[in-house]
Image (spheres, helix red, strand yellow):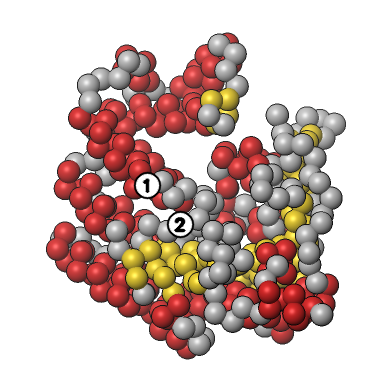
Amino acid sequence: MSPAAPAPLTSRTSPSLEEALVATFAAAGFARLDPPILQPADVFLDLSGESIRRRMYLTADAEGHELCLRPDLTIPVARAVLAEGMAMPARVSYLGPVFRFRGEGPGEFRQAGVESFGRTDIEAADAEILSLGLNACALYGLPQPDIRLGDVGLFTALLDALPLAPAMRRRLLKDFGQGRVNLDLAQLNDKSREGAPAHAGVLAALDGADPAAARALITDLLSIAGISTVGGRSVFEIAERFLEQSSLDAGGGLSKETSDILSRYLAISGTPDDASARMRALAADAGIDLNAALDLFDRRTGFFTAYAVNLSSVRFSTAFGRPLDYYSGMVFELHDPARPGAGPLVAGGRYDRLLSRLGAEGAIPGVGLAAWVERLAGLSGAAEDAR
């Protein structure tokens, strides 16, 4: 069942500050787009993961096609860029309502942001986006937010360098974005020491089966049993997890050596320069090649400096990801130091495969950010500016 209809928007936002924020984006060369509020639901489920379903406001058209109120603006803006055939590179901005069940606040809230498509100078584009996020915070009275930085591309490069079964690689990469990869490492190691699970016979029977047919079989069995959700997961998610476990059991778990390398990597954090030195030392000690990914990381740090980013305010963590499946490189969040647990003020990252997954011919680099204007408006400095 979809969440209840969203409550009317009641967040404390200052129109003058919102207009100033949009003007800042325009001055940087980002043209305004306003995509439709009603969007096809399958696009978000395919690109953001089935876990987003429980937070979406869903409906259907007369033909039964599943639709939703847009839960974010990155995907609608990307679809609009493709639909309008915009020339690359394309720089677009947005400001408007999004609709997502959050629990802690109204289901309708406003977001502003920018998306940069088609730039091949990856490191400079990343630094510009982070700089625009910092400018947004400064506009609302917070010139020095906490900067949390991660890198999906580095973690992907590490997985590519390790002897992992494809199913294990997919599992770890998916869990990385959900922030639970450390927990799953422990669980996977525990399972490797356990005996066969009670459903080992079913898993063995599925090993090597056609994935689509096996998924349909499991889905049908769950439906016949009257199971629609378990622990918040849909039948589709349960089937996917079951098939994943079948593949993992057939291919074995993590070796101790691989698990140790992953654990050591995920424990690294600090300033970008310190973290880079520790990652290079780990790679050399483990005999794996991360040079290309780390060279990009270091070049981006150099561009941060060129964009006047205070590196001492940047807290990089190898274990930091964001819960959207389409991120492929840098990810970041900007937080109020006075309220570190209140959620990000601004967040974003790189997603080089997003447009191709939406139908573009070939990969088109992309990076962007979203700003929660209701949270920015709640800053003490913003309240003073609005008076």
**Disc 1 packing (10 Å; few <14; some 14–19; many ≥20):** many
Residue shown at 29% from the left, 36% from the top: 188
Residue 118 appears in view: no
The CA distance from mark 1 to mark 2 is 10 Å
Q: Quadrant of residue 60?
A: top right
For marks 1 and 2 on the same chain, the one whose residue lies earlier in the sequence: 1
Residue 128 in percent (x, y) is at 55, 79
Where residue 340 appears, as percent x and y from the top left, is: 53, 63
Q: Name the residue under label 1.
A: 181
Answer left or right for 287 relative to 240. left
Residue corresponding to mark 2: 321
Task: Label 2: state its secondary structure.
Answer: loop
Give residue 379's position: percent from left, percent from top.
67, 71
Amino acid tagged 1: Val
Q: Is mark 1 on a helix, strand or loop?
A: helix
For the point 30% across and 43% down, the residue is 185
Query: Where on the picture, by quarter, is residue 46?
Result: top right
Quadrant location of the N terminus in the rendered image = top right
**CB under 8 Å between callouts 1 and 2?**
yes
Q: In which quarter of the image is the C terminus?
A: bottom right
Q: In this view, does 185 lie above or below 95?
A: above
Residue drawn at the location 50% of the way across and 55% of the way down: 322
Foreground of the two, 92 or 275 = 275
Badge 2 amino acid: Gly
Q: Is residue 214 above or below residue 125?
A: above
